[in-house]
Image: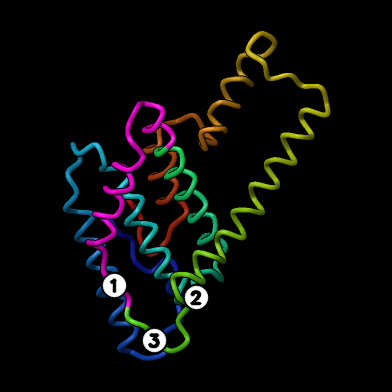
Amino acid sequence: MFREGVFDAALRFGSPEEEAAYREREAERRALLEGLDPNDPRHDRDRLLIAQDQLRDAIGHGADSDPRAQAMWAEIEKNLRAQRAAEIAAGRDPREIDAGDAALRSRLPTRPRFAGVTTDKAVDESVAVKDDQERENAEAEQAAVAAQGLDDSPTTNPVQHAAAGLRAAGVVNPQSVDTVGIAALGRLGGSIALG
C-alpha cells in the first residue's frame, strides 16, 4: 500500500499541473501494485520495479535531498540484483527475467518533461555514482578483514563463508527479500511504502 507524503517536503514542482501529473502517476503505480497477483513468481520483483519507478520520479522532483531516498534506492537495487542472481543460479534464463522486467516497465506511467525536472538518465547516473561509492566502501571493508587475517573459508569459519556467499549474491541480510526489501522500504518511507 502507498503511504503518501513522506518525501513531500523535499518535492519541488514548477507548477500545479506538474504536481497533479506527478500525483496521477503515483496513483497509476498504486493501482499497478494493487493489481499484482501475489501467486505470480514475479510478484516481489514487480513490486520492487514499481517502487523503483516511483522513487525515480520522486528523485526527479527533488526527493534526492532527503537521505532516505538514496537509502531506499540502494535497498531496491540490492534486492533486485539479489533476486536476479538467485533466479539465474536456479537456472532461469536472464533473457526471460529481462523480458518480464520490460513487460512491467511498459505498463508504468510515462513522465512528461517539465522545465527544471531531473531526467530519468540523470537520476540513474546520480544514484549509480552513489552505488559505486558504496561498493567501493564494501570492497575496502572486505580488504581490511582479509588484511587482519580473518579467513572466511568454510573449513575455518562457516558463518563468515555463508555470509560472504550471500554478500556475493547481493544480499546484506540473510532474511527473505520480502522481509528485508519490502519491509525496509516501508520503514525507510517514501512516496510509496509497500505492505
> In the rendered image of this protein, does residue 195 appear above or below residue 92?
below
> In the rendered image of this protein, does residue 4 appear above or below residue 173?
below
Q: Give the spatial CA distance, label 1 vs label 2.
A: 18 Å
Q: Is residue 97 left or right of residue 170?
A: left
The image quarter containing residue 15 is bottom left
Q: Residue at coordinates 42% horizontally, 61% vertically from top-left? A: 190
Q: Are marks 3 and 1 in contact (CB under 8 Å)?
A: no
Hey, which residue is sitting farthest top in the picture?
Answer: 155
Of the two numbered discs 3 and 2 in the rendering, the one whose residue sits closer to the viewer: 3
Q: Residue at coordinates 73% horizontally, 38% vertically from top-left? A: 141
Question: Is disc 1 placed on a helix, strand or loop?
Answer: loop
Q: Which residue lies under the disc numbered 3?
A: 114
112 or 9, which lies in front? 112
Three-letter amino acid code of the residue under disc 3 = Phe
Of the two numbered discs 1 and 2 in the rendering, the one whose residue sits closer to the viewer: 1
Q: Which residue lies under the disc numbered 2?
A: 62
Numbered label attached to residue 110: 1
Quick one: quadrant of the N terminus? bottom left
Q: What is the crowding at mark 1: few (fewer than 14 residues within 10 Å), some, or many (at least 20)? A: few
100 drawn magenta: yes
Question: Is disc 3 placed on a helix, strand or loop?
Answer: loop
Q: Which residues are magenta?
A: 85-111
